[in-house]
């Protein structure tokens, strides 16, 4: 009930109140429920990762975890660039590439909206598997051993075909 009240308050007043503090939601982010503080946390810069790669992973995570749901607007490019102190062109590139991949849909003058969170989930899974494969190969495992370990872990977790 409190979450509904919070959402209605945000829609009616243009302000989002969470934990007793209010954050302004700008007009270019009508469908977004992320406060400036949340944007700062999500888009916190990692100096060891290429900016576009990090931004893509961050947006996919926000979509995959349903923080921004299908039909909702993702945070506006100008707003994220200002709040997170990143280049707007880098985020525009990421949003456009995610649009080409079917995760987002761009609407002229309105922004980008979530279309398919499953694509984002698959991309994140591929990234995680890529890191695990890289680490396993550095440990000296061969590709056949990796496949065996992967199948074993899937079976151990009770995952069946089609799940």
Image (tube, helix red, strand yellow):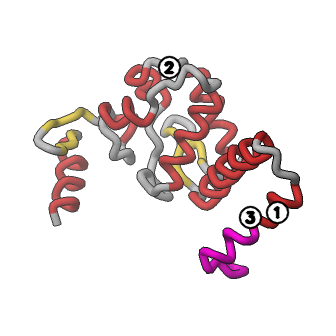
Residue linked to disc 3:
150
Q: Please tell me whether mark 1 sits on a helix, a strand or a loop.
A: helix
Spatial distance from mark 3 to mark 1, Cα to Cα? Answer: 5 Å
Asked which quadrant contains residue 99, the reply is top right
Looking at the image, is mark 3 or mark 2 earlier in the sequence? 2
CB contact under 8 Å: marks 3 and 1: yes
CB contact under 8 Å: marks 1 and 2: no
Q: Residue at x 59, y 23 (%)?
A: 48
Between residue 130 and residue 123, name the one nearer to us: 130
Residue linked to disc 1:
147
Looking at the image, is mark 1 or mark 2 earlier in the sequence? 2
Magenta residues span 151-163
Instruction: Count the numbered circles shown.
Output: 3
Q: Residue furthest front?
A: 140
Q: Residue at x 20, y 55 (%)?
A: 8
Quadrant containing the N terminus in the rendered view: bottom left
Spatial distance from mark 1 to mark 2, Cα to Cα? Answer: 39 Å
Q: Residues within 10 Å of mark 2 (few under 14, many from 20)?
A: some
Between residue 153 and residue 6, name the one nearer to us: 153
Residue linked to disc 2:
86
The answer to whether residue 110 is left or right of residue 126 is left
Position of residue 127 measured from the top left corner of the image (x, y, whole percent): 68, 46
Q: Is residue 103 above or below residue 155?
A: above
Q: Residue at x 30, y 32 (%)?
A: 37
Q: Nearer the viewer, mark 1 or mark 2?
A: 1
Q: Residue furthest left?
A: 20
Quadrant containing the C terminus in the rendered view: bottom right
Asked which quadrant contains residue 15, the reply is top left
Q: Nearer the viewer, mark 3 or mark 2?
A: 3
């Amino acid at each position: 009930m409190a979450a509904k009240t919070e959402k209605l308050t945000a829609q009616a007043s243009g302000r989002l109140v969470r934990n007793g503090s209010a954050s302004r939601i700008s007009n270019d982010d009508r469908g977004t429920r992320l406060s400036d503080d949340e944007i700062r946390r999500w888009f916190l810069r990692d100096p060891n990762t290429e900016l576009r790669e990090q931004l893509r992973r961050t947006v996919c995570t926000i979509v995959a975890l349903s923080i921004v749901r299908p039909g909702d607007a993702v945070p506006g490019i100008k707003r994220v660039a200002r709040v997170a102190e990143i280049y707007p062109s880098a985020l525009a590139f990421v949003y456009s590439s995610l649009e080409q991949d079917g995760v987002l849909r761009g609407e002229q003058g309105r922004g980008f909206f979530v279309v398919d969170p499953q694509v984002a989930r698959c991309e994140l899974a591929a990234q995680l598997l890529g890191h695990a494969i890289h680490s396993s190969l550095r440990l000296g495992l061969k590709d056949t051993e990796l496949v065996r370990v992967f199948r074993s872990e899937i079976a151990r977790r009770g995952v069946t075909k089609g799940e």
